[in-house]
Image (spheres, grey):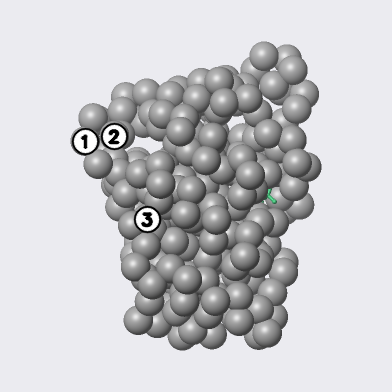
Amino acid sequence: MRRKLAAGNWKMNGVSASLDELKSLAGTHADPSVDVLICPPATIVQSAAQTVDNTPISIGGQDCHAESSGAHTGDISADMLRDAGATAVILGHSERREDHEESSEMVRAKARSAQASGLTAVICLGESLAQREAANTLDIIAGQLAASLPDNSTAENLVIAYEPIWAIGTGKVPTLAQIGEVHDFIRTRLERRFGAGVGRGVRILYGGSVKPDNAADIFRVPNVDGALVGGASLKASDFSPIIKALEESA
Ligand code: PEP
């Protein structure tokens, strides 16, 4: 059985005052039946981890360098995230693939480093609108899966987030059938590559305009093991009903 996961990506939002949202979330979800992960900006990873210490909420980063240390001004290593209290890191988000020209090969190198440091790599995949309209979605996903995932991944240190680029922050959401088609495809590819045990154990999240009012429907789709949520994870009052919908689907 895969334990469901509600993950929040705060992106470049959040300062010390935002820790109040975390406190509120931890207060409402003292004993959740699903995993809850919040990925705040790097500047508050440590204080966020301290804020949720002794609660079931985990903290993650939003990116890491492929090297564990060295002359890389402005970058952050997986070891540093781990040292700050993170247990996971989002890698290959489409905004990083676009803004920083990150290739799938770079994402794999980062994921290897994250896993070696004891972090779970939450690897994002997804097609653009043009790719979907050209009926290339599954080819794009297959290519990203093949090139972005480290070979020795396990069900514990790998999470996949399927995030159609055109659905991120736009309010547009694929149909449930479209989500199901891609999640089933990812599951099949994971089983083929890693074997049935690992392939069936890796969690596959859906991401892209998940909100309190559409979460329950999305969570009913087979092979959707939770969500990676951007905008609606910033406020506890928005993220909390999404967590509850996931608990009800479990
Ligand atoms: C994201 O950026 O990972 C995301 C899913 O954003 P939003 O929920 O705001 O679409």
Q: Secondary structure at mark 3?
A: loop
Identify which residue is drawn at 55% across, 20% down.
177
Of labels 2 and 3, the one closer to you: 3
Q: Position of residue 248 (x, y in %)?
A: 41, 46
- Residue 115 appears in the picture as rendered: no
Count residues near mark 3 (Cα–Cα under 10 Å), then give few for <14, some for 14-19, many for 20+: many
**Above or below, comparing residue 101 to residue 49 in the picture:** above
Q: Write down the residue under mark 1.
A: 197
Q: Are marks 1 and 2 in contact (CB under 8 Å)?
A: yes
Give whichever of 154, 151 is nearer the camera.
154
Q: CA distance from mark 2 to mark 3?
A: 18 Å
Instruction: Point out the tag, 2 or 3, that comes first from the N-terminus.
Output: 3
Find disc 2 in the rendering and name its residue: 200
- Amino acid type, label 1: Gly
Q: Three-letter amino acid code at disc 3?
A: Val
Residue denoted by label 3: 34
Q: How many residues crowd around disc 2 within 10 Å: few (fewer than 14), some, or many (20 or more)?
A: some
Rendering coords of residue 126 (x, y %): 61, 35
The quadrant of the rendering that contains the N terminus is top left
Task: Give the residue furthest to the left.
Answer: 197
